[in-house]
Image (cartoon, rainbow, N blue to C red):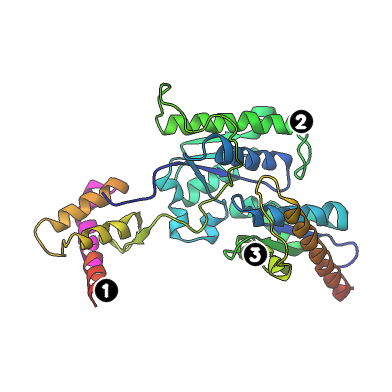
Amino acid sequence: MNRNERVLVVPCSGIGKAYGTIGREAAYGLVEELRPGRADVVALSLLVLGDEETRARVQAAPVITIDGCKLACASKMVAQSGGKIVHAANVLDTHRRHRGLRPKGVSRLNSDGEQLARVLAEELAAAADVHSREEA
Amino acid sequence: MPELPRKKVGIVACSGEERAEGTVTRLAALKVLELLRPDDMVTICLPLFLAGGEGDRAFARFHPTVTVDGCEKRCAARATEQFSARPAAALVVTDLVGDHAQLGSARRLNDAGSRAVRVLAQQLADWVDALLDRRDDQPLRQTAEPSAAVEAACACGSGIPVLTLSVGGERPTLIAVPLIFKQLHQQGRRPGADGVAAELLGLVRIYNPIPEAEVPVYQAALEREYADFCRRKEE
């Protein structure tokens, strides 16, 4: 990824667990706050349906996936769509590195959940930067 | 009949992470799950139809399902029909609010977005009632905001028990069959005994449509599978 290349972020569509919400919030944190103008969120449901335009997008740009459980829907779907994953994050792994946090809530995260999302967003930003330097 | 998970209405939201309309679908589904009809609905992440197992793909075959999409691409409705079963109803946010409504951002809905969530959630709750054939005189288990927050839970990883059969060169997936096998085995109904094959077929047909012309091949395949099941149990 050079400085002008935008990274695509594909969070899982997790709907029933806090980890899905944390992954999504981290994706928005990366795109809107940490690396604005250098990253875009892609809806996973479009890849589920095999939307050609979305498949072409993930094939043409570096992709960061964020999964919220071990089923790893986001990384599986991007891989199946021919996308190039430069970093595959899993909220569970980030939580293991920050065991003191007790994230709860689905439609609304508690403060630990929000904090874990910020930590994950920073990890994603670092991963995007590493890839950017390698490609420069 | 076997003890299957209680029948509920499934709701599948597109959750489109790029658009505010996608957030509306997800929050509306969660509102029904957490507040409006917590005992009567179940949800699943859409990508599990591909990334999950056969049990996940059986979701809409077991639960009458309402899909809710953010836009005219209708990913949830189309993917549910393609990978699981035709949904009983399909709602689209843009049908509710129009194509150019300002609902806020995908991350933060504005007041109009929050209103759309409330209206859509009520529409979903009405569909839940209709599909469960709840009459107006039956009290709802939950009609108001609960005193304690209910933690939502999805059906991810808790798929419907299924068996994939080999039938005439095809591999149909039948729901509930593992539980039916278990029940018959516990009742001491052994393969080959009088009436077992017919009873097995009858139970399987409660949950799975089997074309009349194919009944003999299905019955033979089920007998084979049940015999294998009993052999494994008794080894």
Q: Which residue is mark 2?
A: B111
Q: Looking at numbered disc 1 in the image, what kind of residue is underneath it?
A: Arg
SS type, badge 3: helix
- When the figure is inspected, residue B117 is found, relative to residue B83, above or below; the finding is above
Instruction: Indicate left or right for B203 with B118 as reference.
Output: left
Q: Earlier in the sequence, mark 2 or mark 1?
A: 2
Q: Looking at numbered disc 2 in the image, what kind of residue is underneath it?
A: Asp
- Assign the C terminus of chain A to one quadrant of the image: bottom right
Magenta stretch holds residue A49? no
Residue count near mark 2 (Cα–Cα under 10 Å), binned few <14, some 14–19, many ≥20: few
State the image coordinates of residue B63 (x, y, percent, origin top left).
43, 44
State the image coordinates of residue B56 (x, y, percent, origin top left).
47, 55
Label 2: chain letter: B
State the image coordinates of residue B224 (x, y, percent, origin top left).
22, 66
Judge whether residue A126 can be spotted in this image: yes
Name the residue: 40% across, 24% down.
B135
- When the figure is inspected, residue B37 is found, relative to residue A127, above or below; the finding is above
Mark toward the viewer: 3 or 2: 2
On the same chain: label 1 and label 3? no
Mark identifier at residue B141: none
Q: Looking at numbered disc 3 in the image, what kind of residue is underneath it?
A: Ser
Q: Which residue is mark 1?
A: B232
Q: Which residue is mark 3?
A: A75
Residue count near mark 1 (Cα–Cα under 10 Å), binned few <14, some 14–19, many ≥20: few
Label 3: chain letter: A
Name the residue: 76% across, 30% down.
B111
Name the residue: 78% across, 57% down.
A115
- Spatial CA span between label 2 and label 1: 59 Å
Of residue B109 and residue B75, the one placed in the foreground of this image is: B109
Segment colored magenta: B209-225
SS type, badge 1: helix
Identify the image quadrant of residue B159.
bottom left
